[in-house]
Image (cartoon, rainbow, N blue to C red):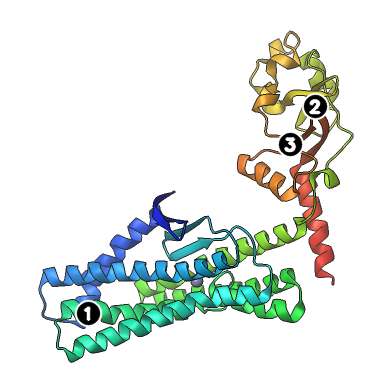
Amino acid sequence: MSISVGKIMGVKIRLHYTWFIIFVFITWTLAAFYMPDQYPGLTYEVYWITGLVSSIILFSSVLFHELFHTYFALKKGIPVPSITLFLFGGVTQIAEEPQDPGFEFKMAFAGPASSFLLSFIFGLAWLLALQLDLPPIITAPLNYGWLINALLGAFNLIPAFPMDGGRILRAAIWKLKKDLIVATRIASNAGGAIAYLFIFFGLFLILFDGLILGFWFILIGWFIKSGAEASLNQAIISQALSDVKVADIMTKEVHTISPNASILDVVENYFYKYKHGGFPVVDNGNLLGMLTTQDIRMVAKERWNVLQVRDVMTSSEKLVKSQPEEPVTDAFLKLSKRDIGRLPVVEDGKLVGIITRSDIMHIIRVKTELAVKK
Ligand SMILES: [Zn+2]
């Protein structure tokens, strides 16, 4: 979905595929509409050059903004695997949630502050260029530079989590209430409300003659809304599962099946009887593989009585497994990434338990319910 274009401060810079679409779209909008409107009477070539340069200024400004967040994260020792530029700007991927409200505040504020600083620098350069009577091919991109950075700074200050303004809001509530989940919930509710305002305003504009602008407002509203929901879920999950190990919640009494049993036998005596979609295949305590309904579906029903479990199972080497000491967040990631329902838990080759998606959903639900009642 994205390509890598280099490294700054050891952080991978990536371009999402939507970036290319939006880069062309913005360059075209600037060259065909914005520049001719602001500076009438220039040549076609000048419009396209100023449009292209301004578009590059826009995306470099977004990168500059993201690099400021990155700088603060790295300084605090939080790893930053990558920065991805996409449709609406940039996303700095940090490897963990910030540890205290003061730091989150600083890191969030660094972005908009850097945009306002850049706006100020472009503004000075623009005024200087005007003084020197330089042509529009120079002044137009400089003018655009201060304007777009001021907008970037202001836009990111919208108090809708996970945007910078929402993070600042969350840090403030976090400091007051001393509870990250409660703070995240309030900040993302604010984000949801603001998202609806954007969407309704967009619809209003579409009804009353502002089709393109209205469309943008709806798109931004939708973007804020999905961001708010995703980050709330992520914050709740990572908070609820912090310091829970697989051994704490796994099922220890597991129904296992023998490699020598016939498929017909296990279907009738295990799959019909117990409500599981898969069973570990165990011999002398050693995990040999797993047999799931998907595996059985691959063989014709007439052969169920001749085939043995070992012929049909997914062998142990091919299985994704967990260990008792593994954090549940990691096990959850394995399940979600591969879209599987259960992981056998293995210690020294022996099966010691099984952990399922519903075990994890259960602990998340209980933990968050208890956390909110505080
Ligand atoms: Zn930012």
Q: Residue at x 37, y 74 (%)?
A: 213
For the residues marked 3 and 1, what is the alpha-carbon distance in whole angstroms?
59 Å
Q: The residue under label 1 is which amino acid type?
A: Ala
- Asked if disc 2 is less than 8 Å from ligand 1, the answer is no
Residue 125, by quadrant, is bottom left
Q: The residue under label 2 is which amino acid type?
A: Phe
- Judged from this view, the residue extending furthest toward the right is 253
Sequence-first tag of 1 and 2: 1
For the residues marked 1 and 2, what is the alpha-carbon distance in whole angstroms?
71 Å
Q: Residue at x 71, y 57 (%)?
A: 237
Q: Is residue 79 left or right of residue 204?
A: right
- Camera-side residue: 245 or 234? 245
**Which x, y percent locates residue 186?**
68, 75
Could you tell me which secondary element the residue under label 2 belongs to?
helix
Instruction: Name the quadrant of the C terminus.
Output: bottom right
Pointer 1 residue: 140
183 over 284 or under it: above or below: below
Pointer 2 residue: 271
Pointer 3 residue: 343
Q: Residue at x 27, y 69 (%)?
A: 29
Pair 1/2: label in front: 1
- Camera-side residue: 95 or 277? 95
255 over 14 or under it: above or below: above
**Which x, y percent locates residue 1?**
44, 48
Task: Residue 194: tell me if it is visible.
Answer: no
Could you tell me which secondary element the residue under label 1 belongs to?
helix
48 over 328 or under it: above or below: below
